[in-house]
Amino acid sequence: MNDEVHSMRLRPHHILCVRFISIEPPGRGEDFDILCRHVKDILLSHEDSIIEVTEGVDDLCDPCPNLGYVKCISPFGDEDKVRRWDTRIINDLRLTYGDKKTAGELRELINQKAPLDFCRNRCPWKTICTVPYSTVCP
């Protein structure tokens, strides 16, 4: 277990999904890939790192080439679509924007609630999802 404490701002789909994807989304660049692996490490193996549930652009978005002027412009899901994902996820997890939880608390919460309705019915990334969502991934 890594004892180093971090503080990050992450939007709901990053909190939920980053730890379960098997690869970094393609075409985002080396800086994004490095940060994505770092976020995944925090979400998987840090207990006391603080994660603030953020509405809109977060720390993981910063190096992404699909970040437009303060919004996501990804062809796989622009800001409007991503905010709809975030709304479904935050509601399913019973969190609110501005909540601050440790990575350990978020892991426990996700483990209790997974798989979410969003995961089963709405997620466009099911094909790169891993355990514990293997039951909902094709």
Image (spheres, rainbow, N blue to C red):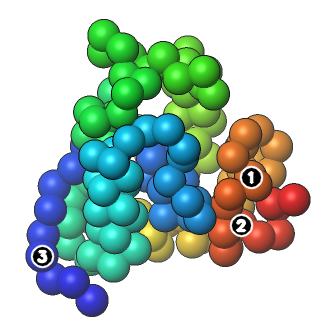
116 in relation to 71, above or below: below
The x, y position of residue 22, in whole percent, is 59, 64
Q: Amino acid at mark 2?
A: Tyr
Answer whether labels 2 and 3 touch (C-beta < 8 Å). no
Mark 3 highlights which residue?
Answer: 4
Callout 3: helix, strand or loop? Answer: loop
Q: Which quarter of the rendered picture does the N terminus lie within?
A: bottom left
What's the distance in space between the residues labelled 2 and 1, CA to CA? 9 Å
Q: Residue at x 54, y 46 (%)?
A: 25
86 in relation to 130, above or below: above
The x, y position of residue 38, in whole percent, is 29, 62
Q: Residue at x 33, y 48 (%)?
A: 30
Callout 2: helix, strand or loop? Answer: helix
Mark 2 highlights which residue?
Answer: 133
Quadrant hosting residue 80: top right
Callout 1: helix, strand or loop? Answer: helix
Which numbered disc flags the more N-terminal residue, 2 or 3? 3
What's the distance in space between the residues labelled 2 and 3, CA to CA? 28 Å
Q: Amino acid at mark 1?
A: Lys
Question: Badge 3 local density, few (<14 within 10 Å), some, or many (20+)?
Answer: few
Numbered circle sitting on residue 126:
1
Answer whether labels 2 and 1 touch (C-beta < 8 Å). yes
Which numbered disc flags the more N-terminal residue, 2 or 1? 1
The reply to whether residue 42 is in sight is: yes
Which numbered disc flags the more N-terminal residue, 3 or 1? 3
* Nearer-the-camera pick, 91 or 19: 19
* Nearer-the-camera pick, 77 or 63: 63
The x, y position of residue 14, in whole percent, is 45, 47
